[in-house]
């Protein structure tokens, strides 16, 4: 008994030692900056000197009394509500279609994943050209089809800018999330489908009664990851529209940047960053609780 | 014996020379400079003069403000040795903190036209930057398009400008580019502010710093109202909300619009277009009003006061404004800011004539040289909101007033 206890204790301490470097990195590069961000968000720190005085909730009040912040928050949550379901539905459909392909299946998977191999900044530049009013691909195609009346300034109108950005992000990200769904699909025992075929159920019933419940964990992962990705979206709208026209494509992450580097108000930027962090945590926890209840354990 | 002595003396001499050369300090100067193909050769001239110095050029990207690039480097204590600097509150703040040195005793400062050095000079006499040229703004126009619609002389007043735009519109040619994402503040804002506000408030710089200038006055409202009228009358390129700085130039160079309201710093590119390009002074004045233009220093250069290469950085700065200036100027197509220029400087005669006219009139600075740093990002957004119809011009002026005064109170 004593020998097995000391073995267990030894294994535990070895395990702790193994984890320690990763913990140290996490603390130094993630936790410590988060703590400092939270601390300085209640001060008037200007980012140039180490002097900072406590100002209470003043920064938060100032940030949320800015009328444009309402539009910025609407944009971010619009993207969450549109992007997350649409992206996950498309990624799931794509992975179900590709999963069943025997010949050249790997080629299809590679093509699906290809956009994700480029950086978001490159994607943004490319799509900015595609959406351009003069010489852009979309307007050129419309012109060639004698549909000049449908030519738009896609990134210059409040009605079209967010849908245009959403389409770009979905095109970029669908491959990445398909990979997670493909992993989930490959874990489903094939015998279940064979038994279902014997019982005479159709394709749609197979999908909704077998596939969907059994990839619940993959859905949970993807929904949370895509939600966090959208909440912290910066590079794509920054390159494509700089948050315009007006504030109609500005995201919360962009507003943090604007406060910090354009208006040189680091204190407001930190307050906004703390808000975004808290919102992200709350939404993640709620989503986890919601989806965990629906996961099926085999 | 004699031959041996001479031989030994020669060996000693060559060794001494080699040792001296080898022990000369090797310096790498980091330089946040212009993004252009000729810059490498231009720097090479300095490196040829001083073989122990290597210039490590970091080209300034076309998007983003200089302050956006400087701010994180200042915080990280990782500034370049030589870098662009604008004359504004942000730079003054850096000078107060000792990040930028006092350049008032340099030859470059002494040789700069005093009126152009003034925006880079603090109230205590510290000069924190040296401009790299004289800045003003012009309407560049496609001479063939003007001729095509029967415009025989360039407009001298606002109403004449609108009349010419109407002629162009009737011929199916967009009159100009209005690009809030481009450069409307340097052009439309600065010029209409000069014409309508500076005329009545000659001490505008001091008043803005003191927070006493009334931005809700009609002159400021006119800035937003005039831009909106250009768009509402259909005189602007249709993609006015999504064009940025470089795309605005492209649209003009691709002959999709008749005019481009742009800076003198763009003259080098615009006047080299493959069609006949003319220039005229911005006609923001009404009939009978004396024209007030914009005459200001260009963006300048400064050095890192805390750099270990400070002495060489200073040498490079002096060279930029001395022997190296002619090459820089002839490639950029700038207007010199110096009293005397070394070398032969080529100036487009079209610009010279207009500059002479401009110098005889009263002039104001460019907007970023007097608008508070915190308020600057708001100006572009106000343009966009007015053009979208989300704000009336008077409301935009009110928001500008609120922001400018709040930044002073801080």
Image: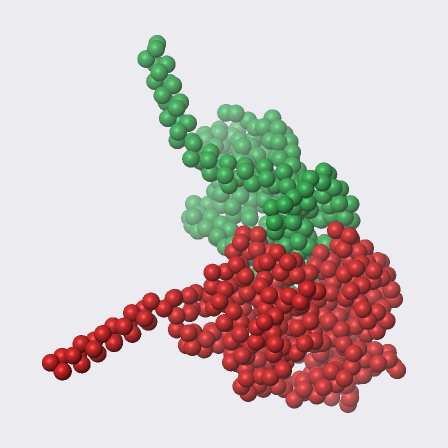
Chain colours: A green, B red
* Position of residue A256 measured from the top left corner of the image (x, y, whole percent): 65, 49
Position of residue A292 relative to residue B354, above or below, is above
Relative to the observer, which residue lies in front, B235 or A254?
Answer: A254
Position of residue A253 relative to residue B308, above or below, is above
Relative to the observer, which residue lies in front, A215 or A7?
Answer: A7
- The answer to whether residue B325 shows anywhere in this view is yes
* Position of residue B248 measured from the top left corner of the image (x, y, whole percent): 66, 71
Relative to the observer, which residue lies in front, B5 or B242?
Answer: B5
* Position of residue B286 measured from the top left corner of the image (x, y, whole percent): 86, 78
Say which quadrant the N terminus of chain B sits in.
Answer: bottom left
Residue farthest toward the top in the current orientation of the protein: A1
Q: Is residue A183 left or right of residue B169?
A: left
* Position of residue B257 measured from the top left corner of the image (x, y, whole percent): 70, 77
Which residue is painted at 32% across and 68% down in the image? B22
- The answer to whether residue B171 shows anywhere in this view is no
How many labels were placed on the picture? 0
Q: Is residue B173 left or right of residue B199?
A: left
Residue B21 image-quadrant placement: bottom left
Which residue is painted at 53% across and 54% down in the image? B77
Q: Is residue B255 left or right of residue A24?
A: right
Residue farthest toward the left in the current orientation of the protein: B1
Which residue is painted at 54% across and 68% down in the image? B33
Residue A80 image-quadrant placement: top right
């Amino acid at each position: 008994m004593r020998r097995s206890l000391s073995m267990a204790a030894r294994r535990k301490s070895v395990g702790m030692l193994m984890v320690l470097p990763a913990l140290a990195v996490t603390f130094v590069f993630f936790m410590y900056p988060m703590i400092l961000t939270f601390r300085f968000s209640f001060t008037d720190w200007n980012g140039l000197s180490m002097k900072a005085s406590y100002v209470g909730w003043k920064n938060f009040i100032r940030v949320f009394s800015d009328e444009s912040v309402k539009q910025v928050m609407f944009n971010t949550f619009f993207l969450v509500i549109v992007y997350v379901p649409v992206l996950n539905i498309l990624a799931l459909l794509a992975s179900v279609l590709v999963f069943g392909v025997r010949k050249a299946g790997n080629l299809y998977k590679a093509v699906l994943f290809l956009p994700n191999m480029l950086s978001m900044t490159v994607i943004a530049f490319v799509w900015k050209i595609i959406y351009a009013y003069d010489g852009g691909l979309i307007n050129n195609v419309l012109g060639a089809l004698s549909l000049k009346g449908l030519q738009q300034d896609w990134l210059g109108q409040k009605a079209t800018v967010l849908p245009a950005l959403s389409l770009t992000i979905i095109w970029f990200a669908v491959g990445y999330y398909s990979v997670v769904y493909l992993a989930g699909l490959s874990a489903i025992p094939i015998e279940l489908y064979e038994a279902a075929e014997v019982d005479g159920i159709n394709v749609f019933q197979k999908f909704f009664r077998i596939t969907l419940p059994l990839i619940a964990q993959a859905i949970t992962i993807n929904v949370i990851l895509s939600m966090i990705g959208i909440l912290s979206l910066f590079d794509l709208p920054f390159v494509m529209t700089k948050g315009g026209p007006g504030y109609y494509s500005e995201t919360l992450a962009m507003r943090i940047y604007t406060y910090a580097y354009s208006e040189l108000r680091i204190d407001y930027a930190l307050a906004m960053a703390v808000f975004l962090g808290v919102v992200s945590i709350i939404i993640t926890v709620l989503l986890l609780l919601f989806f965990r209840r629906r996961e099926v354990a085999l | 014996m004699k031959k041996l002595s001479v031989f030994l003396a020669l060996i000693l001499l060559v060794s001494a020379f080699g040792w001296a050369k080898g022990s000369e300090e090797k310096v790498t100067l980091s330089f946040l400079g212009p993004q252009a193909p000729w810059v490498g050769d231009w720097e090479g001239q300095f490196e040829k003069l001083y073989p122990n110095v290597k210039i490590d050029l970091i080209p300034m990207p076309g998007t983003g403000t200089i302050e956006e690039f400087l701010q994180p480097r200042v915080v990280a204590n990782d500034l370049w040795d030589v870098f662009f600097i604008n004359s504004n509150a942000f730079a003054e703040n850096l000078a107060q903190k000792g990040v930028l040195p006092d350049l008032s005793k340099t030859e470059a400062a002494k040789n700069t036209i005093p009126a152009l050095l003034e925006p880079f000079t603090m109230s205590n006499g510290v000069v924190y930057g040296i401009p790299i040229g004289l800045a003003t703004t012009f309407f560049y126009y496609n001479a063939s398009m003007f001729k095509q619609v029967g415009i025989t002389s360039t407009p001298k007043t606002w109403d004449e400008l609108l009349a010419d735009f109407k002629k162009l519109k009737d011929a199916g040619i967009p009159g100009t580019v209005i690009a809030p994402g481009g450069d409307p503040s340097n052009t439309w804002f600065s010029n209409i502010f000069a014409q309508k506000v500076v005329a009545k408030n000659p001490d505008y710089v001091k008043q803005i710093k003191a927070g006493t200038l009334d931005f809700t006055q009609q002159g400021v409202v006119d800035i937003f109202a005039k831009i909106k009228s250009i768009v509402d009358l259909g005189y602007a390129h249709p993609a006015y909300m999504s064009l940025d700085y470089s795309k605005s130039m492209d649209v003009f160079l691709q002959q999709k619009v008749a005019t481009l309201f742009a800076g003198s710093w763009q003259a080098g590119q615009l006047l080299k277009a493959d069609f006949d390009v003319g220039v005229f002074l911005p006609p923001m004045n009404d009939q009978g009003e004396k024209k007030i233009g914009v005459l200001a220093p260009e963006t300048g250069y400064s050095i890192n006061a805390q750099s270990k290469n400070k002495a060489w950085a200073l040498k490079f700065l002096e060279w930029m404004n001395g022997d190296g200036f002619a090459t820089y100027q002839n490639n950029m197509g700038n207007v010199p800011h110096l009293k005397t220029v070394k070398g032969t400087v080529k100036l487009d005669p079209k610009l010279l004539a207009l500059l002479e006219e401009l110098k005889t009139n009263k002039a104001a600075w460019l907007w970023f040289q007097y608008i508070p740093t915190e308020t600057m990002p708001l100006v572009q957004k106000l343009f966009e909101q007015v053009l979208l119809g989300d704000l009336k011009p008077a409301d935009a002026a009110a928001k500008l007033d609120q922001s400018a005064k709040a930044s002073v109170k801080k």
